[in-house]
Image: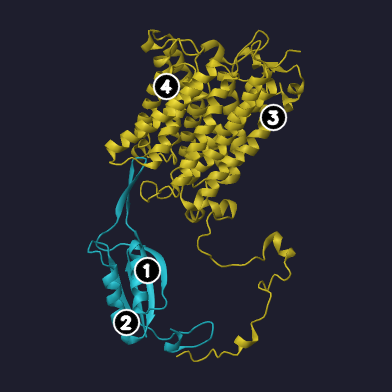
Chain colours: A yellow, B cyan
């Protein structure tokens, strides 16, 4: 048995917790951006992924992503390879280079949290109008058909005894923490679903203002916090390289926020809170694949480019008429492309990945690999997600009916209302709680006070 | 009896309330309202998308008064609510058929 490194293991487990927190953070980020009548549904679309994807991951997902590649093609791992993670319970199940070994189960836990947030990210494209039951089924099918295989392509590094994915091992594109697997993948999937479901009632006509920007900013803050686990945790060790990655994650978020705000100030006249929250996320999206390949100065370039590019890209949906409600395309697809392709330009040999990009004298060798990886994931995700979406739409219906959409999906899908700011009357006495009431018909339980009963009630003039 | 309804700017509420108390008005009902008059609304920008917001936040204040008090009360509101800028609001007065105090059942002016 190999000895595991306690420091590395502790960091990976802590990072897994950080990444898990990103999904509730995303729920707040998205939830604040929709109207008050659909905030609960928006948050539930993220929370349900915490349930469904976790179970799928344990049963077959980890095998699909990190099991031996079926047929050695590098397209999908063996889903039966690690059923129930049973084989990872052994003390012999360790991974990593000598001196930095961690339990493989810690890696499986860490990667499971990535799968959860990937699925949750897609939901932003279909706010306010999706049937929750269909979405729930979608989370499992999409993870199984799209996310788990793509994670295998990019994240599953081959060893002498293990067959990995084609992008990581044959193409050798760099995607450190998921610019293709998460960001481009989710952005393309979001676009496909937005097209399958169609536009919200009143899109480009009614104001659909974010109902609570304080939630959005809290969510953005939690996402940034969690992103240190996402990127620096992907090092799977607590080393000097991890510190570079951590610093790049700080820098790109900061500069992404600044450039987005600068674009707004010049174009719209004001720097907005929604712009700050969106810009920092755009910078973080772009540094996700590139955090190991650039220096902190490179992170300024990549984060800055992403913030500015995404600030413009969010207007496309109005120009071209697709209702990607919360800008999964404008922020995640575009930011993911900036970061993934940006590696081919801004990569520097002194960074942990050790490759020079075009601007650092490395020629186009890395650049074309990055472009192929980005395009492959984008096209596969768009086509496969479109097919899944159309299939589910035909089989179950993916969109609520018109009346439900107008009243709000919180009520139609969950029988709840987020905010009770004005009491609206009503009483307890229906549903499963009724049997525990002393008398469901007389809810206040006492007769009128006799003294007041004598007050005359006729002739009020 | 009369019902005086005043639509005023939200940040003038405290000033108007104090002026009315000083005048001797014991009670009022206040609610949040939104609307527009000649000033129309304003625009807001979210991720580059500009929205025209037609309905501006206002406060609606309702006061029940005896017939003779309605004019002076209106003057007090007018004096306290006016800033001289567009969007200061409106006041209107309508006759009231009946008023009842719920706790005692009193009706008419005694219920005010």
Look at discs 3 and 2 and give the one toward the viewer: 2
The reply to whether dot 4 and dot 3 touch (C-beta < 8 Å) is no
The reply to the same-chain question for discs 1 and 4 is: no
Drawn side of residue A321 relative to residue A79, left or right: left
Q: What residue is pinned by disc 2?
A: B70
What's the chain of the residue with tag 4?
Answer: A
What's the chain of the residue with tag 2?
Answer: B
Q: Nearer the viewer, residue A240 or A452?
A: A240
Q: Residues within 10 Å of mark 4 (few under 14, many from 20)?
A: many
Which quadrant of the structure image shows residue A166?
Answer: top right
Q: Is residue B26 visible?
A: yes
Drawn side of residue A67 relative to residue A208, left or right: right
Q: What residue is pinned by disc 4?
A: A299
Q: Secondary structure at mark 2?
A: helix
Q: Which residue does the image show at 36% across and 35% down from the upper left?
A: A316
Q: Quadrant of the N terminus of chain A?
A: top right
């Amino acid at each position: 048995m190999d000895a595991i490194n306690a420091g590395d293991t502790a960091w990976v487990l802590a990072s897994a917790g950080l990444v898990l927190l990103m999904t509730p953070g995303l729920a707040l980020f998205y939830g604040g951006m929709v109207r008050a009548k659909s905030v609960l549904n928006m948050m539930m679309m993220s929370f349900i992924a915490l349930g469904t994807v976790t179970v799928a991951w344990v049963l077959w997902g980890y095998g699909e992503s990190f099991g031996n590649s079926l047929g050695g093609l590098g397209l999908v791992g063996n889903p039966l390879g690690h059923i129930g993670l049973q084989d990872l319970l052994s003390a012999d199940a360790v991974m990593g280079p000598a001196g930095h070994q961690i339990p493989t189960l810690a890696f499986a836990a860490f990667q499971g949290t990535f799968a959860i947030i990937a699925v949750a990210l897609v939901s932003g494209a279909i706010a306010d109008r999706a049937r929750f039951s269909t979405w729930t089924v979608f989370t499992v099918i999409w993870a199984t058909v799209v996310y788990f295989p793509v994670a295998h392509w990019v994240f599953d590094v081959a060893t002498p005894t293990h067959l990995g994915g084609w992008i990581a091992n044959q193409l050798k594109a760099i995607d450190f923490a998921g610019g293709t697997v998460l960001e481009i993948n989710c952005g393309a999937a979001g676009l496909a679903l937005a097209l399958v479901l169609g536009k919200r009632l009143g899109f480009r006509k009614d104001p659909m203002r974010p109902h609570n920007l304080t939630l959005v900013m809290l969510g953005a803050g939690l996402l940034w916090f969690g992103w240190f686990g996402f990127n620096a945790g992907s090092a799977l060790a607590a080393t000097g390289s991890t510190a570079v990655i951590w610093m790049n994650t700080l820098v790109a978020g900061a500069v992404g926020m600044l450039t987005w705000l600068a674009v707004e100030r010049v174009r719209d006249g004001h720097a907005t809170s929604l712009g700050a929250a969106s810009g920092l996320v755009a910078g973080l999206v772009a540094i996700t694949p590139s955090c190991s390949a650039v220096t902190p100065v490179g992170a300024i370039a990549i984060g800055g480019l992403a913030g500015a590019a995404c600030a413009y890209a969010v207007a496309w949906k109005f120009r071209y008429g697709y209702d990607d409600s919360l800008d999964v395309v404008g922020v995640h697809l575009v930011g993911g492309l900036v970061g993934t392709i940006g590696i081919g330009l801004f990569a520097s040999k002194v960074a942990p990945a050790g490759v020079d990009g075009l601007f650092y004298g490395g020629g186009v060798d890395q650049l074309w690999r990055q472009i192929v990886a980005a395009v492959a994931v984008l096209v596969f995700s768009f086509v496969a997600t479109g097919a899944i979406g159309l299939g589910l739409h035909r089989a179950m219906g993916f969109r609520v009916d018109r009346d439900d959409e107008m009243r709000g999906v919180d009520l139609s899908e969950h029988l709840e209302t987020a905010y009770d700011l004005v009491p609206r009357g009503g009483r307890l006495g229906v549903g499963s709680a009724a049997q525990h009431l002393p008398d469901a018909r007389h809810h206040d339980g006492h007769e009128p006070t006799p003294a007041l009963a004598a007050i005359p009630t006729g002739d009020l003039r | 009896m009369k019902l005086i309804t005043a639509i005023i700017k939200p940040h003038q509420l405290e000033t108007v309330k104090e002026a009315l108390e000083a005048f001797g008005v014991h009670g009022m009902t206040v609610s949040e309202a939104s609307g527009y008059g000649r000033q129309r609304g304003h625009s807001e920008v979210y991720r580059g998308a500009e929205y025209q917001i037609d309905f501006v936040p206002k406060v609606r204040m309702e006061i029940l008064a005896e017939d003779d008090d309605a004019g002076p009360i209106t003057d007090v509101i007018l004096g306290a609510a006016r800033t001289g800028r567009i969007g200061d609001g409106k006041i209107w007065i309508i006759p009231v058929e009946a008023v009842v105090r719920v706790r005692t059942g009193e009706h008419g002016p005694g219920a005010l």
